[in-house]
Amino acid sequence: MARPARRRRLLAGFVLLLLAMAPHMAVASPPGGPAVQTGTEEDGHDLWLRYRPLAAARAQAVRPQAQGIVVEGPPTPVTDAARRELLNGLSSLLGAPVATLQSARPGAIILRRNDQSASQIAGLGTQGYAIQPLAMAGGMATVITANSDTGLLYGSFALLRHVQLGGTLHDFTETAAPKLKIRVLDHWDNLDRSVERGYAGQSIWDWWRLPDQPDARLTDYARANASIGINGAVLNNVNAVAQSLTAPYLAKAAAIADVLRPYGMKVYLSARFSAPIELGHLKTADPLDPAVQAWWNAKADEIYALIPDFGGFLVKANSEGQPGPGDYGRTHADGANMLASALRPHGGIVMWRAFVYSERDASDRAMQAYAQLQPLDGKFAANVLLQVKNGPIDFQPREPFHPLFGAMPRTQVMMEVQITKEYLGFANSVAYLGTMWQEVLQADTCRPHCGTTVAQGLEQPDQPTALTGIAGVANIGTDRNWTGSDFDQANWYAYGRLAWNPDLGADRIAREWLAQTFSADPHFIAPAQRLMMMSRQAVVEYMTPLGLAHQMATGHHYGPAPWVSDLARPEWNPTYYARADQAGIGFDRTATGSNALAQYAPELARQWGNKQTVPLDLLLWFHRCGWDEKLRDGRTTWQDLIGRYDQGMADVDTMRHLWLSIEPYVDDRRFARIDAVLAVQQHDARWWRDASLAYYLAISGKALPDGVRAPDRSLSDYKAIQLEFVPGITK
């Protein structure tokens, strides 16, 4: 009998029908029948912490090794959270109750905190853990050791991950510590529960019901973050309102902090720079004004009285209309250091965003952050982190790494990435961003010498005691599956794992996520992992091939609009970036153009400044090319551009084919939801390809090569498409 998901599938045309049928003719059910029972459904709420029962043979092998949990030493809220997670997780995985034990014995899992502060276990720091088997009279036990309660929590989740991925305990040895100290999610959430660039429902912070009625779901949020090592959350939008710092809302933030604290998470707030004017009724927010400094000192005292472990402030200043120190002729360092001084007595930090550009600056937008901030190297306080986006524009499907990485050796720099897919199709696409972030993290900055990656620069600042960190703009909302699309959970997971260890491979992380979220069966993992690993490049090809950027529609950034040229600021227009005309296409950032290449190390500037050695994926980012100019792959610019649009569209077809081929391994509800997303993505890939080519045909006067399909509609038809009530747009 056909499964419900198959009956519900909508196929668009005969070709798509064949595409859907092919995998079902080729793929057999796994031995012993389907991997999931027909008719089963999951809603996605459990994320990668599903803890579904192991196969009988595996459960039988592990059960004697996990008979109970022992917490040595006085219990704390954090060790209680670790113990509960182990009890619930192992009981579910093994199909038998696991007990709390009063003393160690064979088969026990022992949580052992090192309480000798003068003799910390080397290599673990304050957040790491060690897991190893322990021989004792009568058999074996497993011990998780750490220098802190939080380390024990992370070790407990690591052990559960190991079991979910097919491992047993008495042969398991792992020592791990995070390479970055601060690993935060930035929630662009507003007080009315709208979420800027959010595609998964409302904000999970229900401010109206706080502080008296914290949502029980926040505990699941904290658990999920702790399981992948995320240790902080910025609660409100970087486009902050001063009201977030008022007493009622600080009390609400304190209630959230109480829920997150047992899972090793601190709360942070985005601070509006002009708050002394708006809340304190001062006439200025000048960071060098003593009255302004006194106001922030008092505000910090007020916050820490409510939230003793408050993490600190995130600040967006003098960017896109936000107030900042530049309004008073002061530098970014002046502004950041003033706030840092207020937080320093309490142990708080400032994360100062480097996303700055000005409508009064006619220079290349990609160069403006470097120009403003690099001269301030060494001038930021010791509790300030400069938060730099992965690329110099704005979370594009592909960008070169930001030139500030490696260029500020005396400044603590953290990376900012966007988990929510503002420029990659929202929740209507499958785009695994682990490959994007790995590409940036492993990029060679050639600073201070070649062979120094972005990740190494983040992990190893000059001072051993320096702050290190990374921030991810969250894709989390009130949708039952948290992220709108089930596959977007993978990006939350990948961010956490790479924040813990930037040197982990995106392929390994994909396997981990798939096995825990769906099935560990290799017949499922192989095609699903292939789908994930090709997905982001597919989006690049059908949206911004050959190094194009920012070709998205105005404001909401969904869908193509390469023709837009009438917006108030030049750098908001897609035509600013592509610069297409009858002669050619591309942004000249060499010495003959904006010379943005000069902001990179000389070795990279030479490589990227040469059309024969620059990666073709960055060609039009750095170079202007004639339509008929022969590229080193043997095709002309025009041929290559068309070929890449077509390849991206074909890759999405392959992705859906791969998904249809593994239906027997996925429950009905999630299979149907992801299949529906892929169907939309097929439509959008064709839309992107056809609308873009219609524009370039008109602007260049070129003809399509023989055998190339013409766009389905006219350029005027594509220009007439207007989307209304698009999610993620807030006032």
Image (cartoon, grey):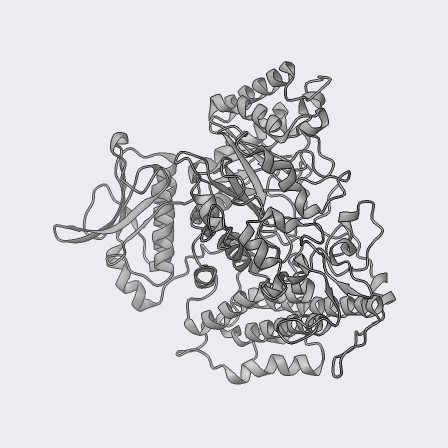
Name the spot of residue 137 as percent of width and height, x first. 12, 50
Please give left or right for residue 391 compared with residue 710 in the image.
Answer: left
Image quarter for residue 700? bottom right
Tell which of 376 and 69 is nearer to you.
376
Give the residue displayed 62% in from the left and 76% down from the top.
Answer: 7
Q: Nearer the viewer, residue 628 or 414?
A: 628
Q: Residue furthest bottom?
A: 25
571 is higher (above) or lower (below) than 346: below
Looking at the image, residue 662 lies above or below residue 616: below
Q: Position of residue 595 (x, y in %)?
A: 67, 50
Q: Which residue occupies 49% across, 29% down? A: 382
How many labels sit on residues? 0
Q: Residue furthest left?
A: 137
Q: Position of residue 525 (x, y in %)?
A: 45, 69
Q: Position of residue 621 (x, y in %)?
A: 67, 58
Q: Is residue 264 visible?
A: yes
Image check: 160 left or right of 525?
A: left
Q: Is residue 423 left or right of residue 486?
A: right
Quarter in which the C terminus is drawn = top right
Q: 41 above or below 628?
A: above
**Residue drawn at point x = 38 percent, y = 49 percent:** 157
Q: Is residue 256 visible?
A: no
Which quarter of the rendered picture does the N terminus lie within? bottom right
Q: Nearer the viewer, residue 487 or 83?
A: 487
When asked about the image quadrant of residue 320, the answer is: top right
